[in-house]
Image (spheres, rainbow, N blue to C red):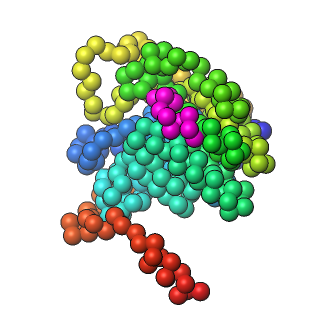
Amino acid sequence: MQLNGDQRLEAYRRMLRIRRFEEEGMRRFKGDKIPGFFHASVGQEAAVVGACLALRIDDAMIGTHRSHGHPIGKGAHLDALMAEVMGKEGGICKGRGGSMHFADRSVGIISESAIVGGGIPLATGCAFSARVRGIDQVTLCFFGDGAVNQGTFHESLNMASLWKLPVIYLCENNGYAITTSVARSHGQPDIALRAAGYGMPGVTVDGQDVCAVYEAAARAVTRARAGEGPTLIVANTYRFDEHSFGLVIPGEPYRSIEEVDSYKRHCDPIVLYRTVLLEEGINEGSLAEIEEEVTEAVKQAVKFALASPMPRPETLPDYLFNSPVAGAAAELERN
């Protein structure tokens, strides 16, 4: 299972869209246009896009607090995403979710969560829902290495394996849970080996290689759709920026300048993949056209976000509550 011709260019486009969106986001954060926090996934684009390209548009996906790349990787439009991080009414969640809580049903994004490991049981429940409904929908769940030590990880993988649920658990292992390295926090640092305890395949891939991630994810999706149960994929990757952009972490540095610089020079997934495409015969002009297109899309997204109004204070309680009784009554009335 390999990326075909169109998918290969689309992989480059989506990785670049994530990178340029977040670079612009970091600039706007500095300019006080983005409130709260901004967790950039620069350096982790291949792990996200490779996995997303293995899905159908109607497949479900759950993200993390490092959330901008996930909907972009699945094909979401940039305008409403940029408006959301700015807290604007034109945002995908009308400015209520912000940077860490995107949800976009149009591309299957059920939710994203700022709680470490919080999305894992949601993904498991979503996969169980597909089983109950008798459809072949697959759920992809992203989480970081820090979530592996949460109880939700173990409980969810056990349930998914027991009931052979159609879910792919993808760990974006960037080596650090904020400042704590995997070596210092995991009794078994080879995270993929955890899968054996739950009777499911555990696969480790180079998270900087979009093709390798796609191939692993495509096999897992095929297996899940056939009713053979879940897979744990560990994509070893690296975040180039701090845990949260603009965050000053006190104390001794937890990673050296040399380490970060080495990854930036030798392991940038976009640079690596651009080189692969050129070696395979894709002409420079085609890539330059994609790069220009992405730059323009990000510019338009910023323009849309800046022009979008802030939510009105009196609408603060809107969307906080949902009445299942009212919903059921409306459904009965329609039928």
Image position, residue 95 (x, y; %): 33, 58
Count of numbered circles on the image? 0
Q: Residue at x 30, y 55 (%)?
A: 87
**Residue 147 lies within the magenta run:** yes
Image position, residue 215 (x, y; %): 72, 36
Q: Is residue 231 left or right of residue 40?
A: right
Image position, residue 101 (x, y; %): 40, 50
Whether residue 249 is visible here, answered yes or no, is yes
Q: Is residue 143 left or right of residue 281?
A: left
In the rendered image of this protein, does residue 219 appear above or below residue 105?
above
Stretch of the chain drawn in magenta: 144-156
Point out the image quarter for the N terminus: top right
Q: Residue at x 59, y 86 (%)?
A: 335
**Residue 12 lies within the magenta run:** no
In the rendered image of this protein, does residue 124 appear above or below residue 183?
below
In the rendered image of this protein, does residue 324 appear above or below residue 298?
below
Whether residue 286 is visible here, answered yes or no, is no
In the rendered image of this protein, does residue 308 appear above or below residue 292?
below
Secondary structure, magenta segment, majority class:
helix
* Relative depth, front residue between 140 and 298: 140
Q: Residue at x 51, y 30 (%)?
A: 148
* Relative depth, front residue between 245 and 124: 124
Image position, residue 237 (x, y; %): 53, 26
* Relative depth, front residue between 155 and 175: 155
Image quarter of residue 3: top right
Q: Residue at x 63, y 32 (%)?
A: 233
Image quarter of residue 276: top right
